[in-house]
Image (spheres, rainbow, N blue to C red):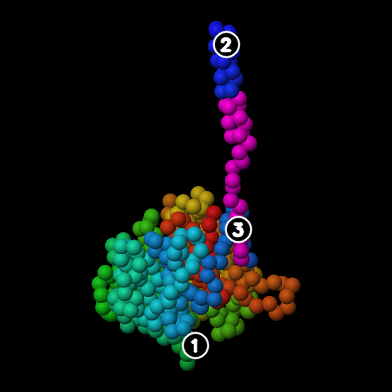
Amino acid sequence: MKTSSMIKKISQFTSLILIVTLLVQCKSEKKEIVKKPVNDTFLKAPEGFSIKEIGKDLGRVRHLTVAKNGDIYANRSGLEDGKSILLLKDTNKDGIYDEQKAFSELPGTGILAKENYIYTSSNSGVYRYKLNENHDIIDVENPENIVDGLIDMGRDNAKPFTIDNNNNLYVTIGSWNDACRNQETEKGMIPCTILDSAGGIWKFKANKLNQTYADGSRYATGLKNAVGLTWNYKTNSLFATDHGRGGLSNYYPDLFTSKQNDELPAETFYELKENDDAGWPSTYYDHQKNKRVLAPEYSGDGEKTSDDKFIEPIVAFPAHLGPNDVLFYTGSMFPEKYKNGAFIAFHNQSKEIDKGFFVAFVPFKNGKPSGDWEIFLDNFAGIDPTIPDDVLKHRPCGLAEGPDGALYVADDFGGSIFKITF
């Protein structure tokens, strides 16, 4: 009896050992499933990033924003089927945007999801749509007017904007005159009266309806056309990218070569405080000399500097790249190096570096640039050098961050929206 009991116990113990051994073996043989990066476009991103084209043939989509429920809103600079604002929805949250709606008859550039509203701009004003508890627009037919009557002269007339946490609304009013040049004398206007109503950033209240230009105040001046505009909530300050002027050798061939015309002046990135002056039109920033010089319309020769106290850019980029949006990345999806750094969408090409149509990244530390800028998302042009006369495919214009930390890029030439994940 004792022998039988002992044999039974030994058998049970052996079975237990076998089960444990099999479990350990299965665990050791189980392989971790790693999702490989997916790229269904010809865009190029750093290793580990996936790129999906989530919308195409959408028209001239400029800036875009992502609501808390994941809905994507894009503003278009022209009407498509009579409508300007586009809404993309992922109805079953499977990562595919399967519903598309359009509304509004006021084309423009700026758009921003902020608290319980979708704010958007035309070329002459800013208005908003109220959201319900599901973050859907309540009434697409009747937006509230925030400010109207801003100058629209047809050139560089986009009204990008941003909002801080104190309900201050900052709106760019670009200059339609490249260098505040008198068309008859080809000299600079002294003083430049354009600066009274354009060539800077104006401040209004985001929660006050039916404001006019007169209700605002000029926050910063000397910016020819700051299309990239954002409020950095970490530094609690305003940042802007400005388009540089052109035409140096066209108007002043005795002072500037065609090469200098292609390579000057810099495209600039600023952190702005109230009453700052970035020096346009009397000066421009020369990134090759790392200094601000007098513009030829104001007695400059490419060397003379100004005695006025204009602010310096925090980063200077090669000429004619056309920075059209800036976004500080606050998500947790991307690697740590991107945290609180700035993505900038460049809309044009620089002959100096023979590159263009890309999204760049500027690393930040403690609220300041902390290293050289780099190209993050490249090859929007999509031109195949093996194909004669191949044409431009896309150009990046707008940037937005989703609730999950994904980055979205709008393309106002090919009409696509891209989603970048890690």
Q: Is residue 204 magenta?
A: no
Q: Quadrant of the C terminus?
A: bottom right
Q: Amino acid at mark 1?
A: Glu
Q: Earlier in the sequence, mark 2 or mark 1?
A: 2
Res. 38 mark: 3
**Residue that badge 2 annotates:** 4
Q: Position of residue 198 (x, y in %)?
A: 38, 79
Q: Residues within 10 Å of mark 2 (few under 14, many from 20)?
A: few
Q: Which residues are magenta?
A: 18-41
Q: Earlier in the sequence, mark 3 or mark 2?
A: 2
Query: Is 150 displayed left or right of 2 in the figure?
Result: left
When asked about the image quadrant of residue 129, the answer is bottom left
Residue nearer the viewer, 101 or 158: 101
Identify the residue shown where x is 34% and y is 76%: 140
Q: Earlier in the sequence, mark 3 or mark 1?
A: 3
**Residue that badge 1 annotates:** 186
Q: Amino acid at mark 3?
A: Val
